[in-house]
Amino acid sequence: MDANAEARLREIYYDPARGLSGKEALWRRVQRIHPGQYKKAQVLAWVGKQALSQVNAPKTFKGFFRIIAPPKTFQIDVVHLSGSSAGANKDIKMMLIAVDVLSRYMAVVPIKRRSADMLVAALDALLDRVGSVVGLQSDDEFDTKAVRAWADRHNVLLATGKAKDDHQDDGDRLGIVDAAVRTLKRRITNYQVAHDRLRVGAEALQSLVSGYNTTEHTALRVRDMGAKRATMRTPEEVWEDESAQAYLYSVGADHNDELSAKVDLAVGDRVRRRVDRGKFDKEKPTFSADVFTIVRIDGRRYTIQDDGGKRAPRAYKYFELRKAGDDVQGTAAGAGRLAAAAARASKRRVVSRTLKELA
């Protein structure tokens, strides 16, 4: 496409009366104004390079990575009984909840207060209940000297680098225990309503946990040797079946390998980050007008920084980023504003360094 052809497209696309629309709408308008002069692939490719299109176009979601781990690896969390429930359950104000990653098998240990010695005592009770523990995954709450010492004594691999504000998002790394907590809380509420009582005794609590462990789980679809289709299992069944655990691990690993092959992000790539809307906004998420650079990859998290060298306050998942491309185009006014912003940022950094040197 020559310069004149691009200029005609730009004239239409950025005209408030005729453009500022999507790819298909632009193509139909170009056909009417310049019949037979453009191919559809040319127009769509040109629009894809425009900053405006990249900001508003939806990100193609390829799926979540699955959480897999060796057998007897548990995700753990401490859960409080809130409000009147806590007052009526003075002996069970909070609970340590542990969920086996592969089987989703749940074990719950009541605790009276949140302290290092109580957490260690609860971990001892968990170990007695499940027989052995290979690994524990949790948020930073369990990154204490006492818990680390307990893990060392029992040769347990402890991973606590998952902050609370991180594992509340979609695709979270502690998603298994988070989902189990939501299910157990719902069962506790149902028990209180059905029995018209706030108190949930230790016996009732274990019955609720048993109900969870003996209920078929949608994530536990196992295909037996020679079977044509997979069947849904309960956490208890998979917990007691090593071949089922091996099958689920293999399926999860294959899924993650296939998804990794589809994610085409690397250090140095120019990207836009997702801009989420408010809870009551009707618009779908868009992507930032500013372009960032991927500077670091930790597992499946991407650290980005702007052209001024300032890093984003958190790392991003792959579906929260979209490539901007090296040949991204925009309006002349837009390019001027970006250049001016970069110049102002550079000037601020020089002034900041000078003040530090003077200090």
Image: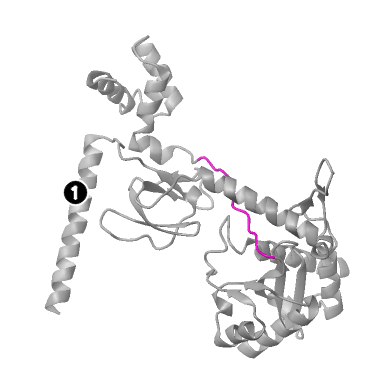
Quadrant including the C terminus: bottom left
Q: Is residue 34 left or right of residue 347?
A: right
User: Quarter of the image holding residue 15?
Assistant: top left
- Residue 120, given in percent of the width and then of the height, sits at 66, 86
Amino acid at pointer 1:
Ala
Q: Is residue 113 visible in this depiction of the protein?
A: no
User: Quarter of the image holding residue 147?
Assistant: bottom right
> As drawn, which residue projects farthest toward the top?
36
Residue corresponding to mark 1: 340
Q: Residues within 10 Å of mark 1 (few under 14, many from 20)?
A: few
> As drawn, which residue projects farthest toward the front?
226
- Residue 133, given in percent of the width and then of the height, sits at 71, 75
The residue lying toward the viewer, choosing from 105 and 92, is 105
Q: Residue at x 86, y 78 (%)?
A: 203
- Residue 92, given in percent of the width and then of the height, sits at 75, 82
Q: Is residue 338 above or below residue 314?
A: above
Q: Residue at x 58, y 59 (%)?
A: 172
Q: Which residues are magenta?
A: 60-70
The residue lying toward the viewer, choosing from 14 and 151, is 151
Q: Is residue 209 above or below residue 329?
A: below
The residue lying toward the viewer, choosing from 37 and 245, is 245
Q: Residue at x 37, y 60 (%)?
A: 312
